[in-house]
Amino acid sequence: MVIGMQIVEVEIKLPYREKGTILSRILGKVRGKIRDIHFHPPDAMGMSEVRMEVIDENPTSLLGELKKLVRNGKFSFRVFSEA
């Protein structure tokens, strides 16, 4: 069975102070696969939110790698559809 490309929305909430360091590592992993990305300002607790849509053949391995990078934040995702 051949699995096609899938669109995955990834929502990451991370501390504002660590945002630059973590995002540089994340973007190194997903470079060339990003379809759309939105950066939201920090809330009252100092947590920034990043939402991005990623197109990938094997999103489970990519999401596993991203979870390892986001240790001090929250990570959630939704699989939209096949591209």
Image (tube, rainbow, N blue to C red):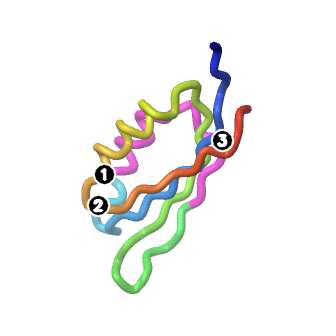
Give the label on residue 18, or none. Answer: 2
Neighbourhood count class around disc 3 (C-alpha, 10 Å): few under 14, some 14–19, many 20 upward: few
Residue at the spot 67% in from the left edge and 23% down from the top edge: 4
Give the label on residue 38, or none. Answer: none
- Nearest to the eye among marks 3 and 1: give it: 3
- Residues at badges 2 and 1 in contact (C-beta under 8 Å)? yes
Label located before the other in sequence (2 or 3): 2
Q: Position of residue 13 (x, y in %)?
A: 41, 64
The residue tagged with tag 3: helix, strand or loop?
strand
Q: As drawn, which residue projects farthest toward the bottom?
A: 44
What residue would you read off at disc 1?
21
Lateral position of residue 70 relative to residue 82, left or right = left
Quadrant into which the C terminus falls: top right
Instruction: From this view, report whether residue 72 is shown above or below residue 24.
Output: below
Q: Position of residue 3 (x, y in %)?
A: 63, 21
Q: What is the distance, in whole Å, between disc 3 and disc 1 at their CAs?
A: 21 Å
Tell me which amino acid carries mark 1.
Thr
What residue would you read off at disc 3?
35
Neighbourhood count class around disc 1 (C-alpha, 10 Å): few under 14, some 14–19, many 20 upward: few
Q: Which residues are magenta?
A: 22-38
Tell me which amino acid carries mark 3.
Arg
Per the image, is 13 magenta? no
- In terms of depth relative to the viewer, which is nearer, 33 or 81? 81
The residue tagged with tag 1: helix, strand or loop?
helix
Instruction: From this view, report whether residue 42 is shown above or below residue 65.
Output: below
Q: What is the distance, in whole Å, between disc 2 and disc 1 at their CAs?
A: 6 Å
- In terms of depth relative to the viewer, which is nearer, 30 or 63? 63
Lateral position of residue 30 relative to residue 22, left or right = right
Residue at the spot 65% in from the left edge and 27% down from the top edge: 5
Kindly indicate the quadrant of the structure image that contains residue 35: top right
Quadrant into which the N terminus falls: top right
Per the image, is 37 magenta? yes
